[in-house]
Image (cartoon, grey):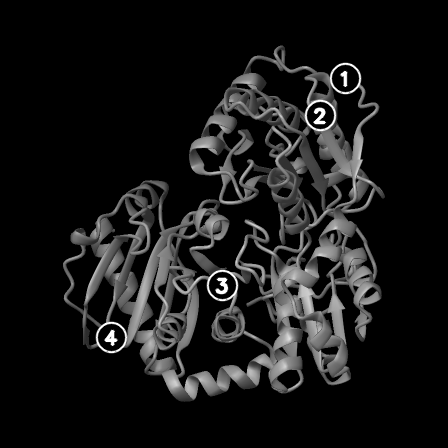
Amino acid sequence: MNDRAGTPATEADLIDVPSLIDAYYTLKPDVSIPEQRVVFGTSGHRGSSLNTAFNQDHIAATTQAIVEYRTSQGITGPLFIGSDTHALSGPAQTTALEVLVANGVRVLVDEFDDFVPTPALSHAILKYNAEGNGDQADGIVVTPSHNPPADGGFKYNPPHGGPADSDATSWIANRANELIAGGLHDVKMAEPSAVETYDFRGNYVDDLKHIINLDAIKQSGIRIGADPLGGASVHYWQAIADRYEIDLTVVNPHVDPAWAFMTLDWDGKIRMDPSSPSAMAALVARRDEFDLLTGNDADADRHGIVTPDAGLMNPNHYLAVAIDYLYANRPGWRDDAAVGKTLVSSSVVDRVAESLGRRLWEVPVGFKWFVPGLVDGSVGFGGEESAGASFLRFDGSVWTTDKDGILLCLLAAEILAVTGKTPSVLYRELTERFGDPVYERVDAAASKEQKARLGKLDGDAITATELAGDPIVAKLSHAPGNDAAIGGVKVVTEHAWFAARPSGTEDVYKIYAESFKGPEHLKLVQAEAKQIVDAALGA
């Protein structure tokens, strides 16, 4: 934890926006250098122009690759495109438009030249495809999500509206790197003209009445403070307040590509993470001014919930409350609609699902795994420990197939309006029924070779039989819900578990751990987890 974590940013912490944008256009990547290649992680290609990791050549090549990919898949409908408030997002969207228009793709941009949250773009794709237009739409979101101000990001969402799967992203990334290596000779670019528009905000906001009980929120009179954290949801929150006549104040309406108004995150960096107590410190300080406070990251696919009685809620705690509430208050959902969680989310979710008589659908990290279940209604709710989730409409049909931070913030208001209790009070009631777990993620050093071995490690390679004094009951290298490889291992006992996965960006592996026996037991779990994994890796 950096000594300045949670304190206001100073001039020395801010990026030089003109230099960042200049580097986007002037620095040319060399794809023989790994750090300068197009690489799609779980949420698209990300990097900084200053490091020659996110530059005009990257975006031109990636967009051309997307054009070729959608052609190979027979996708002939419109492509929706939107961007968040990062400084590199605007230039990257312009580059993408130049390529799309030159290739004859029908493109739809925001009608009001507004920022576009990730969930609004997913919503637009699904709405178009549900209307039976005879073709299929897809989309691009230009965002690095909650990453620091110097970063840019570029995501492709195919016709199912959610994050593209690894088959698609691998093909796109490989083709983009080929195009860059070839000097962009096969990339078509033209001045974007006569591009069509779409009212992302109006369509999204008007449709919220089909998934959130906004009448209950209005009638309760609860006072809500919404902080977009300088992100793409900034104008959506005021539109929601006006459209549904709820007592909602946008507590921070400012947009600044340097994010000078932020408090520093745990490592001393500016990062728009609504699940971080350090990044949310300014909002938490105002918790007594409202009945509920909410935060979103830059593309509004993550949520943060602040209550007067508890401050910022742990994302795992809120997911458990949301699940417990939704499955008791959505009679239109299928009786067999499962509870979706990633395998590094809290086991409280498991216990809540069991109490509801619902099947638990546990999948690897990455929201893409929830897409099929949300589309066909077989999964009512899909959530990640990193504060990303979405769920079904009142009638059990799909809402979005990407994470929706705006939706989860509004759900917190509905929960308070309907139950008269904050989500944090309801979580304490859950712990009285199911136990009070302690959860934490830590990092451990690992070489690139060790990370590669961990990503392919089989649970059978772990020889330990006990973890922190309890017998091991499961050693997983594939997710129980869909048998997909988890890219690491998860070890489970009756009272605790840990999961270890390699980092995609640093020479470390991540250890997620949870104990129902308290903080000291958790520390023991973490220490033994490192020993178990290191032994399996031959470290």
Q: What residue type is labelled 1?
A: Ala
Image-based side of 65 in relation to 526, left or right:
right
Q: What residue type is labelled 2?
A: Arg
Give coordinates of residue 137: x percent, y percent: 62, 33
Image-based side of 531 in relation to 41, left or right:
left
Q: Which residue is drawn at 75% across and 53% down?
A: 14
The Cα atoms of the two marked residues, 4 and 1, are separated by 60 Å
Q: Which amino acid does label 3 sit on?
A: Trp
Q: Is residue 300 visible?
A: yes
Category of crowding for the residue at label 2, using alpha-carbon neighbours closer than 10 angstroms: few (below 14), some (14–19), many (at least 20): some
Residue sitting farthest toward the top: 185
Q: Which residue is drawn at 74% across and 33% down?
A: 108
Which label sits in the foreground, 2 or 4? 2
Residue marked by disc 3: 333
Which labelled disc corresponds to residue 190? 1
The Cα atoms of the two marked residues, 2 and 4, are separated by 54 Å
Give coordinates of residue 194: x percent, y percent: 83, 24
Residue marked by disc 4: 494
User: 525 or 459: nearer the eye?
Assistant: 459
User: 389 or 354: nearer the eye?
Assistant: 354
Residue marked by disc 2: 106
Judging from the image, what secondary structure is the residue with disc 3 in?
Answer: loop
Which label sits in the foreground, 3 or 4? 3
Name which of mark 1 and mark 3 comes first in the sequence. 1
Name which of mark 3 and mark 2 comes first in the sequence. 2
The Cα atoms of the two marked residues, 3 and 4, are separated by 31 Å
